[in-house]
Image (cartoon, rainbow, N blue to C red):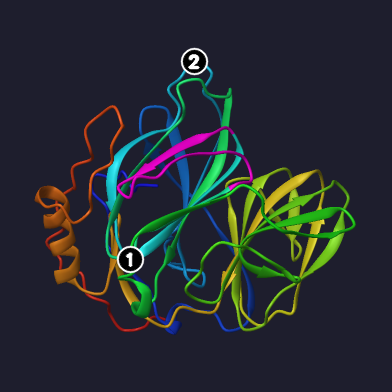
Amino acid sequence: MSNLDRQPTPSVCGGRGFVVAEPVRELLSPRHVKLGESTEVRRLLPNLGRRMVGAWAFVDHYGPDDIADEPGMQVPPHPHMGLQTVSWLHEGEVLHRDSTGSLQTIRPRELGLMTSGRAISHSEESPRDHARLLHGAQLWVALPDAHRHVEPHFQHHAALPTATAPGVTATVILGELDGARSPGTTYSPIVGADLALAGGTQTALPVEPDFEYAVLAMSGEARVDGVPVLPGSMLYLGCGRTELPLHAVSDAGLMLLGGEPFDEELVMWWNFIGRSQEEIEQARRDWQGGTRFGEVKGYDGAPLTAPELPPVPLKPRGRVR
């Protein structure tokens, strides 16, 4: 997933100074961003005052959109470094191509996990013959310094493990939840899970007290620790919990995102996560005129052009409380 903003704002991320070390209930409102010709996303991370949740550094929610007479998602080839992308659908299909030669159609509740490592490029599009509705989330996971230069690769997992309780099914996307572990490769302590709740369900989900958490509302009406969350919003929950109370007023879909607070301070700009201004500048030059990010073959269209860098230096600043 690309950040298609032509004037992207640099974000300083990571560092435990951004983390709330106790349980909180901080409701995040989205910023609306156009993605291609017919898709608008609701951007929840990075958010004003909230940059990351564990290693989760970027969250877009989109749909459900009626694309029966539209091209749907059309994101031309673009670069990434220093991160993993997670494609997650509730409805529709997305065709993924990347510079390692991967070609994969991702369908609802299948994991598309791309590890950029040192450099990769990819495109995403709705297939020509696509379903009427498109609904999903696109997320980035920041890679820690020890692993951010790994060889780029793509994983597709059509079947994922689940944890169940009366009225709730949790599909484990990344990491582990209640004894169920995803086959997706991770590089830091993290969890991502899709929660399907039947209307009227009241339950408490076991969570790790050392993790910070947030819940993204995908559909329906639910209360998370007593707070109503509407589709397209996200509730930041802080750390220090052993369980998370959930109440589904109607049938509801939620995504649980969490992980150990990310110690390292990062610089995120456009589709790059680095550690310094110089790294970001070099990545932009390499995308514009080099071969570092490889070539996406088969996409009908030109790759994205990188926007101009802002004049203000991109440097991780002191921790903010």
Q: Earlier in the sequence, mark 2 or mark 1?
A: 2
What residue range appears in magenta? 92-110
Q: Quadrant of the C terminus?
A: bottom left
Which of discs 2 and 1 lies nearer the camera? The answer is: 1
Residue at 23% of width from left, 40% of height from top? 304
Tag shown at residue 207:
none
Rendered position, 168 above or below 12: above
Residue at 85% of width from left, 63% of height from top? 203
Residue 294: x and y, percent? Answer: 22, 50
Q: Are marks 2 and 1 in contact (CB under 8 Å)?
A: no
How far, Cα to Cα, is label 2 from label 1? 36 Å
Q: Secondary structure at mark 1?
A: loop
Residue at 14% of width from left, 56% of height from top? 286
* Residue kind at label 1, given as amino acid type: Gly
Choose top left, top right, bottom left or bottom right for residue 246.
bottom right
Q: Is residue 94 magenta?
A: yes
Q: Residues within 10 Å of mark 1 (few under 14, many from 20)?
A: many
Residue 189: x and y, percent? Answer: 55, 77
Q: Is residue 305 left or right of residue 31?
A: left
Residue at 16% of width from left, 58% of height from top? 310
The residue lying furthest to the front in this view is: 101
Rendered position, 5 above or below 48: above
Reading the image, the residue beneath label 2 is: 69
Rendered position, 97 above or below 272: above
Q: Is residue 186 magenta?
A: no
* Residue kind at label 2, given as amino acid type: Asp
Q: Residues within 10 Å of mark 2 (few under 14, many from 20)?
A: few
Q: Is residue 238 left or right of residue 10?
A: right
Residue 252: x and y, percent? Answer: 75, 46
Q: Is residue 243 left or right of residue 210?
A: right
Choose top left, top right, bottom left or bottom right for residue 210.
bottom right
Reading the image, the residue beneath label 1 is: 82
